[in-house]
Each structure stands twice: as C-alpha cells, then as structure tokens.
Amino acid sequence: MAAHRKSAHRKPKQRPFTGPAARTAATLALAGAATATSATGAGAAPAEPVPTAAQVRAKVDRLYHDAEVATEKYNGAKEKEAAATKAVDTLADEAARRTDRLNTARHTLGSMATAQYRTGALDPAVQLALSSDPDSYLERAAHLDRAGDRQASLLSSIRRQLSGIARVKARADQETEALAARRAELDKHRTAIQSKLADARKLLATLTAAERAAYERSADAAHGGGPATSADRAVVGAHADRAAPRSSVAAPNSRAARAVAFAHGAIGKPYVWGATGPNAFDCSGLTQAAWQAAGVSLPRTTYTQINAGQRVSRSELAPGDLVFFYSGISHVGLYIGGGQMIHAPRPGAPVRIAPISQMPFAGATRVA
C-alpha cells in the first residue's frame, strides 16, 4: 500500500516533442524571443528626431527661396510660351491670307477656263491647274508653256503660292512643337512652386502658435519690418513726375520718380507668384509694372531685368534703380534712396519698404 501511495504522488515523465509538434514549439520559442528583444528596445530602429523650431524656420526659409527661384523660371517660361503662341497665331493668319489669294487666283483661272470651254478651246495647262491633286499639277507643271502669256503667268503664281503655303505650314508645325515644349516647361515650374509652398505650409503647421508668431516676426525683420502702414500705402502724389520719393534723395529724372511713385502705391498689396498687378505682384512683376507706369518696358524676369540697363555699384544707387539679391539673381526690388527699397518679399508678406542690407546684394541696374 505504501508503495502504491508513493507512485501515486510521482509526476508523470515529460516526453520530448517530435515531428510537427517539435517544429511548432520551436517557432513559438523564436517568436517569444523576438518579442522580448523588441520589448527591451535592443535592435529597434531609432525614431527620427523631431526638428527644432529653429530647424523648421530655416527649412521654411529655404523652401520660400527655392519657390522664388522656381517662380522666376516660371515667369521666363511663361514669356516664351506667350511668344510661341503669338508665332503660331501669326503663321496661321499668314496661311489663311495666302490661301485666300490662292483661291482668288484659282477663281480667275476658272473663269478663264469657262470662257475657253464655251469656245471649245479649253487649254490642257488650265485643266492641269484645276486638278484636284496639287502634287500631280506641280509634277506636270512643265506643260505651262502651252498656255497663253496671261495663263502662264497666273499658273506660275498659283505654283508659287502653293509652295509658299507649304512653307508656312511647315513653320507652323515647328512653332506648334515649340509651343508644346514651352507649355510642358511651364507646367514643370508651376508644379515645383506649388510643391515647395505646400511643403513650407506643412512645416509651419508643425510649430506652435507662439513659434509661428516668432517665425513671422523674424521673417518680417529680414524683409523689412511688420505689415504695411497706412502711411506706407499713401501714393506719392497726383503729379508723380514732380513728386519726390519718401526718402530725402530725389529721383534722377521724372521717369524714375514715376516708377518710385507707382511702387509706393503698391505697398500693402499681396505677394502672388507669377503676378504683375494691378492687385498683386511677385518681385519682378512689381518692378516691371513700376517702370511700365513710367513708360519703360522691362523684361519679365530678375535674370533678364539685371541686363535691362546700365550696371551701377551699390555706392552709386539712386531712386528708381533695380537692386538684385542672391547669387542666382532670384530677387529684385526698386531702390527708393536712403538704403531702402520697395519690394514684394514672399508669400504671406505684402509689398513693403525694406532695407537692402537684409539680403545678400548681387548687383544693381539703372533703367533710365
């Protein structure tokens, strides 16, 4: 009995797993070990550090600058697209005029053919000219000598007109291809601008309200202070050619005075990329519009405006001069004297007065 009680309390002997059961147990053991390793953090990929407010502000500034560079490229592409569109339209008009003249000549030739038919003397050359297949006509044009002097002259004219129309249509095809390329370039730069501005907005959204306010204050300081004041918005005067700019330095001539007066009148209007006024501007759009108000036509982009006049040094600046910034000539303002300019700074910052010392100076041009 004692031996029976002792065996009753003995634990059953563990049997090792074999076959599928063994493989299942091994898999569970490995999974458990991996979970334990993950829980302790060993081998886990480090999380990306959250950028500081200063890093966000620096990246937003770079994005705004890159967007302005893309804006000037967009402006240049848009100018080329407009020229290509005009060329295509001009060639289409020329082809239409040439076709009208050709139809008139053919009508005259048809009248002559009718007269000859009535007399039973339809000339073979006239029959060729009235053929519905111009290529066949041109190939057989050697028969023109059978026609009379007047008919020969008219037939030669028709041949020249057909050749001229073919040349115009070939040029139109080339210009149409160029136009398609310009529009593709325009779309590329537009997409780049929109992408960079969207990235800037996303980054700014990661800042707290206080951090965003601090960024706006620092950006305003870098681009000429706070929002435009009512005094800033006042126009120089009804007689802009006799009015002095707000600085103590007088404009060198009446046209420069009018350009400065226009820029003063634009203060407070929003920055919009690609805009040339009257209700919004980008940087080169503002300077172009200001000098257009003075009767001077400037090219559209910063990198072409810098070559639109006589280069002057920083020490020689006078009101009305164009002042350029950054190594890529990506920003421009209108100098008004006293070390100040009027410019369209960036998205969210309206046209305003700013010191030219706040950005890397790249050069200046005197328009007139």
Image (spheres, rainbow, N blue to C red):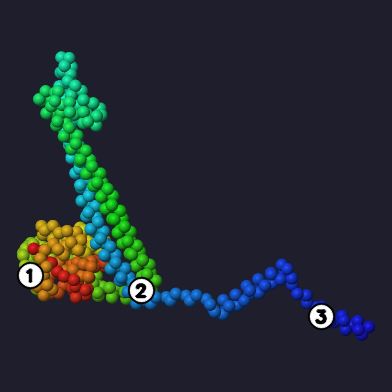
Residue lying at 16% horizontally and 31% vertically, measured from the top left: 158
The residue lying toward the viewer, choosing from 130 and 346, is 130
Left or right of 202? Residue 222 is left
Q: In this orientation, which residue lies closer to the viewer: 213 or 56?
A: 56
Give the class, few, some or many, for how many residues have Cα within 10 Å of label 3's Cα (few <14, many ≥20).
Answer: few
Q: Which quadrant of the view contains residue 295?
A: bottom left
Circle 1 Cα neighbour tier, 10 Å, few/some/many (<14 / 14–19 / ≥20): some
- Residue 170, x across and y down, in percent: 23, 42
Amino acid on which the number 3 mark rests in the picture: Lys
In this picture, is 83 found above or below 22?
A: above
Quadrant, the N terminus: bottom right
Among all residues in the image, which is located at the extreme right?
1
Task: Tell me the SS state at disc 3.
Answer: loop
Tag shown at residue 11: 3
Amino acid type at image mark 1? Ala
Q: Residue furthest bottom?
A: 2
Q: State the image quarter where residue 148 is shown.
A: top left
Q: CA distance from mark 1 to mark 3?
A: 109 Å
Question: In this rendering, which labeled residue sits more in front, label 1 or label 2?
Answer: 2
From the image, tell me which residue sits under label 2.
56
Residue 62 in view of the camera: yes
| Residue at x 15%, y 59% (from the top left corner) | 298
The mark nearer the N terminus, 1 or 3, is: 3
**Image x and y of residue 162, in percent:** 19, 34
